[in-house]
Amino acid sequence: MPEGHIVVAIPYDAESFNEVYRNYTGAGGYFAANNIYSRLVVLDVFDRGDIHPDLAETWDVLDGGGRYIFHLNRNARWHDGVPVTAHDVAYTYSEVLKHRYHGLSWLQDIAEVQALDDHTVECRLVAPNAAFLAQLGAFVFTHILPKHLYEGTDWATNPHNLNPVGSGPFRFKEWVKGERIELVANPDYFGEGPYIERITYRIMPDNDEAFRALEAGEVHFAVQDVPCDQIEAFRAKPGVGVMFHPGNSIAFIAFNWQRPAWQDKRVREAVARAIDRGPIAAGVCPLATAPEHYYLERVDWAFNPDARAPQHDVAEANRLLDEAGYARGADGVRMSVGLAYRAIYPHYGIAARIIAGQLAQVGITANVEAVDPVSWKSRFQDAGEFDLLLDSGDIGPDPQLMASFLTSDGPRNTMRYRNDAVDAAFRAGRATVDRAARGAHYRALQAALAEDIARVPFLQHGEHLPYRTEYTGWSWSDGVRGTVPFWYHGKVRQATQATEE
C-alpha cells in the first residue's frame, strides 16, 4: 500500500495541465503533468539515450525507421476507469497534427497514425526518422489524452485541461490557485508503484523560503537549483541531499533573425567575439563549463570538435561593428537591445548580467529582463518580440532533438532561423538508422551552425536539485535513473520501505 506524503516546492502556479495543447515550461502544470499522464515511451536523457516502456510495452521499427508500431499495455486505465486504447493515441496525435498544437514539436514527422486494434497503434512517417522514439520520449508534449473526454470539444476550453484525467501513477485531486496542487496515488496504475499516497506541489516563489522549508523537512524536493556556492553546505545538512548532473543542453545567446541587425553576420560575430565564456561559467557556478561548441561533447558519435564559435576578441568585435555601420554615439553606445532569460533559471540571470557587461565593452547596451513562463510563450515564442534571449532546451543525447528549434519549419524555432544546409543535415541525419552515417550528418550540421554563427554557445550548466534523503526512488536514484521522466515521482518511496524490501 502507498505510504507517505511528499511536498514539492515549485516557483510558479499552474496555467493548465494539458502540455500537449499548450506548453508553459516551469509552470506548476508542467511538473504535475509528468505524474498525471503517460507517454508511449521514455527517453533516458541522463546517459545513453536508451528507450524504455511507458504505455507501450514493446514496439517495432519498420521500413528503415519510416514506420513504427506500438503494442500497448493492456492493463492501462484512465483515472476514471475507462481502458486506455490505441484509439486514444491515434486521437491525440491526429488532433495535434490537425490543429498544430504544441505537441507538433515532436510529432510533425507523422504522416498518418491509426489504431490497428484496441492495443496496437501504427505511426507512418513522412520520411524515415531514426530519432522518432527519442522525440516521443523526451518531454511532456507527447502525453496521451483521453479520447472519450476530449473528442468533439475545443481543446482551448475543455474543462479537463484544469481538471485532468490521465493514466499515470497519480490522480489529480485539487488545485488551490496560488497555493498548491494536490495529487493522490492511482491504485489502478498499470506500472510499478506508486509507493506514496500523496503529492502536494506547493507554490513557493521565494527560493530561499523553499530551501528553508526543505531543510526543516516541510518540503521534500525543490525544482530550483541550489546556488552553486551552497551545494556543499546543503549536502552537510541533516537529511538533505543534492542531485547533480552535468546537464543535457548547452545554453546559447539566441538572436531574433527577424531583426535587421542580426541578419548581418558581422554583427552576430561581433556579439560572439564580445563574449568571454570563462568569466560567465565562473560567475555562475564552479561546476559549470564554458563550451565553445555547438553540441554536447559527451555524445561522441555525433560531436564535431571543429565546429566552434568565434573566440573572444574585443578589438575585432569593435572593428566588425564599425564596418557594419553601427558607430558609437557621443555616449559610446552603438545600439540598445533587450536580453531576456527565463526567471525560473536564476543562474541565467547571473549569466545575463555578466554578458551585459561584456557587450557594454563593445558599445551594446543590453537591458536584462527576467520573464515568467506565460510571457515567454506569448511574447517570444508566439509573437517573436525580442532582441536576444538566453535559452537552451536542445536536450541530448540525440542531435535530432535540436530540429524543433533550428529547422525552418521547427515548431519551437523561436529565433525564426532558416538555413537550407541545416535543414538538409537534419533530414539526412534522421533518414538512416545507421549511427555512423547519422553522426556524419550531424557533424555537418554543427559545421553549418558554426559557419553561420546561428547563435552563440556560452554555458553548460548542470542540475543541482535539493531533496530529502528519507525518500528514495527519485528519477535520478540508482535503479530508477533514466527509466522514467525526469520530474516523475511514481517510484519515490520512503527510504525505510526500500531498505525493508
Image: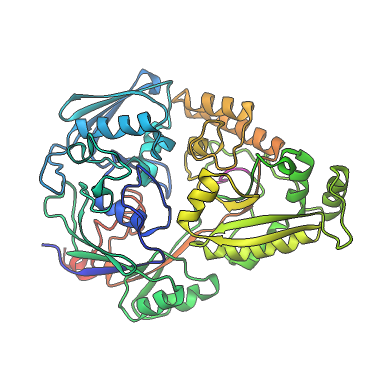
Vertical order, 435 against 500 (above or below): above
Locate residue 291, reporting x and y percent: 63, 51
Using the rendered image of the protein, determine whether residue 248 is visible from the camera's viewpoint: no
Quarter assignment of residue 132: top left
Is most of the magenta stretch helix, strand or loop? loop
Q: Does 51 sit left or right of 455 as displayed? A: left
Q: Kindly identify the residue that appears in the image at 26 percent across and 30 percent down.
A: 90
Q: Kindly identify the residue that appears in the image at 62 percent across and 26 percent down.
A: 420
Viewer-proximal residue among 456 and 236: 456
Does the magenta portion include 444? no
Vertical order, 321 against 221 (above or below): above
Q: Which residues lie in the magenta part? A: 294-298
Locate residue 314, reporting x and y percent: 82, 55
Quarter assignment of residue 153: top left
The scheme the figure's colours follow is rainbow
> Where is the N terminus found, in terms of image quarters?
bottom left
Does the magenta portion include 295? yes
Q: Does 266 sit left or right of 107 as displayed? A: right
Vertical order, 172 against 409 (above or below): below
Using the rendered image of the protein, determine whether residue 54 is visible from the camera's viewpoint: yes
Viewer-proximal residue among 239 and 259: 259
Q: Does 423 sit left or right of 177 as displayed? A: right
Locate residue 249, reporting x and y percent: 52, 49
Q: Does 355 sit left or right of 39 as displayed? A: right
Viewer-proximal residue among 83 and 291: 83
Considering every residue shown, the one lying at the far top of the view is 63
Locate residue 411, reporting x and y percent: 48, 36
Quarter assignment of residue 224: bottom left
> Where is the C terminus found, in terms of image quarters?
bottom left
